[in-house]
Image: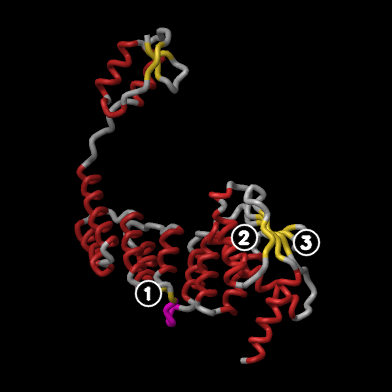
Amino acid sequence: AWSLRWSSLRIPREAVEELRMASPQRRPKIRPGPHVTWEKLKPFKEMFKDPAPKSPEDLEQEKHLQIMRTFTKDGLWEEAVAHLKVMEAEGVPRVLAVWKFAVKACSQAGQWQEATRLLNAMFDAKERVAPDHSCFHAAMDACEVEGKMQPEALLHPRELLKQMQLRGLMPTAFSYAKVLKMFMDSGNRKEAEALYAEVTRQGLLSVWHNGGNILDLQDVDIAVAQVVIRFAVEERASNIARARAGRGGFVVITGKSSKSEAHKQHAVIRIMKEEYGLKVRVDPAKFGRLRVRTEELERLGKERLAKEEAR
């Protein structure tokens, strides 16, 4: 007698042979076991049946998906957009994946206006396809070319956030972090501060604890953590330098990990040391904790304030 390794049911030898014949690519791992009835075996027979052959419609859909994938890979955004019209003319349903390839192709070419037009076209199309977060994120990426924000698209990422909400798709913390980083990299500090205040007010980035003494980044990904630490350092340093009411130094918690896997801690340390020149006390990676003192933030704040006054 035989049984499936991962099952508590016992399957006889003849049953295993039948399963092997029906599905040679997915042969079950077996080990000796007592006999069971064929009635108990029925669920396993259904599980290991070969999948039904694909319909002509499915094969046609896969063909068009492969074409769009190739256009996107090669950066042929005009061809990708044109192929959407070809599919419409042929009566082939344009599923979400097809639209997503077209938006990404436009994104890679920096065609932010065309990418946005496609987002709207998805709702107006006969298929009524709703774009997901990755579609909107790709449209945001289209506002940058070679890592630099296009001048005419400076405020467009914020507009895309509003469109997401109007369409019933709530932006995630990653969505906000992406736009915040764009604003920071392009020097659009005013918009970045306004958006950061909005995100904090909505509770999407509830990272301050213990009265503002602890910055907890354990539950956010590295991209969000990098944006948050920049705002935390600059805001705290500015308040201290201008003698505003508020806290001083703070502790950053990135989460426990081994030294080789402490990627978030390394990213935070790099920003604080290399970008801001701060002296940081770093605990071992297994604690996932580091501290910046008030004196360091005060020094940074006064240096930045002096530069602003000298302009």
- Amino acid type, mark 2: Leu
Q: Are marks 1 and 3 in contact (CB under 8 Å)?
A: no
Quarter of the image holding residue 37? top left
* Dot 3 crowding, Cα within 10 Å, few <14, some 14–19, many 20+: few
- Amino acid type, mark 3: Gly
Is 53 situated above or below 64? above
Q: Is residue 233 left or right of residue 222?
A: right
The residue at the far bottom in this view is 311
Residue 73 or residue 284, whichever sits in front: 284
Q: Earlier in the sequence, mark 1 or mark 3?
A: 1
* Dot 1 crowding, Cα within 10 Å, few <14, some 14–19, many 20+: some
* Residue 152 appears in the figure: yes
Quarter of the image holding residue 276? bottom right
Q: Which residue is mark 1?
A: 113
Q: Secondary structure at mark 3?
A: loop
Q: Quadrant of the C terminus?
A: bottom right
Query: Where residue 211 is drawn, which disc sits there?
Result: 3
Residue 242 or residue 140, whichever sits in front: 242
Q: Secondary structure at mark 1?
A: helix
* Residue 197 appears in the figure: no
Disc 3/disc 2 C-alpha distance (Å): 18 Å
> Measuring 35% from the left and 59% from the top, which residue is drawn there?
100
Tag in front: 3 or 2 = 3
Q: Earlier in the sequence, mark 2 or mark 1?
A: 1
Tag in front: 1 or 3 = 3
Q: Which residue is mark 2?
A: 204
- Amino acid type, mark 1: Gln
Q: Quadrant of the N terminus?
A: top left
Q: Is residue 36 left or right of residue 207?
A: left
Query: Where residue 42 is drawn, which disc sits there?
Result: none
Q: Which residues are magenta?
A: 149-153
Q: Secondary structure at mark 2?
A: loop
